[in-house]
Image: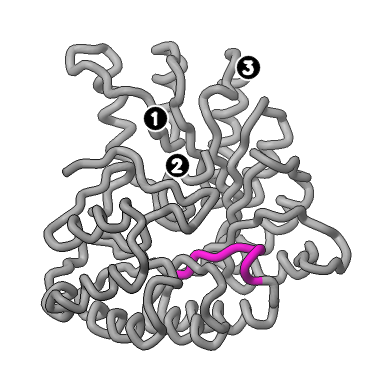
Amino acid sequence: MMIKEPPPFCKNWGQAPKFYIFEARPQFFTWRGKYEKLLVCRTKKMENEEVKNELEQDDQKSSVDKISGKMDLTFCDDQYDYDWFLDVLNRGKPRRVRFRLVDTGKFEGHQLEKMVGMGADLYTSDRVRKDVLELEFILKAAKSVGTIVAFLLQNEIVSEEKHNFIPLASLAHLGRQGLFFHVSNREKDRNLADLSQIGVQCRKGSSRLIYYHHGPMTPEFVDLAKEGVWIHMSNKSIQSEDDLFLFLDMTAAARTSGANCVLYVEKEMSFSFLHEAVKSPALVLFKTAPVDFKSSFKPLVDEAVSKHLDYRAFYLYSTFLQ
């Protein structure tokens, strides 16, 4: 069973499947065995207790034993209790499975610190975790075992202390500690100078700021890319040959700082423009219908698909904020 688009996590965590397994291939998800049955239960919005009973009726240990290192395992923290997560993390560790924990605020900081230290990648946001000291302890645990903490910036970036907001200086400090930031201008305008300041500190801390841009391009993006910021954008932003050259300059600047640019093809693109984008170091992801195998675009599509997008350069899945 092949599913081209992942579950809709963006707006409401409660609407998404809480537990699923998929092969580690961008934009393609494969459900296997018992977990396919569990997915169907989730799409019917069964209660947590009912799904838990489904798992308890199966042999949980044998189910986890079947998981291979080619798979990612993603949990939402409100599905099971703390001890259950620890048990699964402990049994999955020898199989080198990558666990991803979506944080909705159920667990305390010290509990997340424990799970991250056992090998779980944490995906959280500034609407859930606002305590800088708590995040520092979690980051320290992540660094000790090589996991990551991805942080979605949904609120405005403020320069001074404000209730329920993390100030710019603290965000930059967390970037220096190794926090991976993800921020988009889809709903809020973003100050590129603020993003640049955070991006510089992230680069020093061996993490990154990943920026998802919507709208026209400006020359300032080249300077932003020089600071080590990953930039995601749609080909809708490339309206002219000048825009294409600006994108190529931005990609070259990003590569000099160890980052890159990601271009999402959402509408028809001329062969010459697509050729330049694919032949550049940028990563090109297609959200359009598959091309015919006889099409002159097919070799370019195949070349683009062969490039691997690092899992640290996107939030949960590659088109999350696009």
- The quarter of the displayed image where residue 176 is located: bottom right
**Residue situated in front as seen by the camera: 219 or 264:** 264
Q: Which mark is residue 78?
A: none
10 Å crowding of disc 2: few (<14), some (14-19), many (20+) = some
10 Å crowding of disc 3: few (<14), some (14-19), many (20+) = few
Q: Which residue is mark 1?
A: 287
**Residue situated in front as seen by the camera: 131 or 246:** 131
Say which element carries label 3: helix
Cα–Cα span, label 1 and label 2? 9 Å
User: Is label 1 in contact with label 2 (beta carbons under 8 Å)?
Assistant: yes
Residue stretch in magenta? 122-129
Indicate whether 232 appears above or below 46. above
Is residue 125 within the magenta segment? Answer: yes
**Residue situated in front as seen by the camera: 127 or 189:** 127
> Mark 3 or mark 2, which is nearer to you?
2
Indicate whether 150 appears above or below 310. below
Say which residue appears at 44% left-offset and 72% top-offset.
Answer: 77
Q: Which residue is mark 3?
A: 242
Q: Amino acid at mark 2?
A: Thr
Which circle's residue, 3 or 2, is located before the other in the chain?
Answer: 3
- Horizontal placement of 254 versus 22: left or right? right
> Mark 3 or mark 1, which is nearer to you?
1
Which circle's residue, 1 or 2, is located before the other in the chain?
Answer: 1
Indicate whether 34 appears above or below 228. below
Cα–Cα span, label 3 and label 2? 26 Å
Say which element carries label 2: loop
Q: Which residue is mark 2?
A: 319
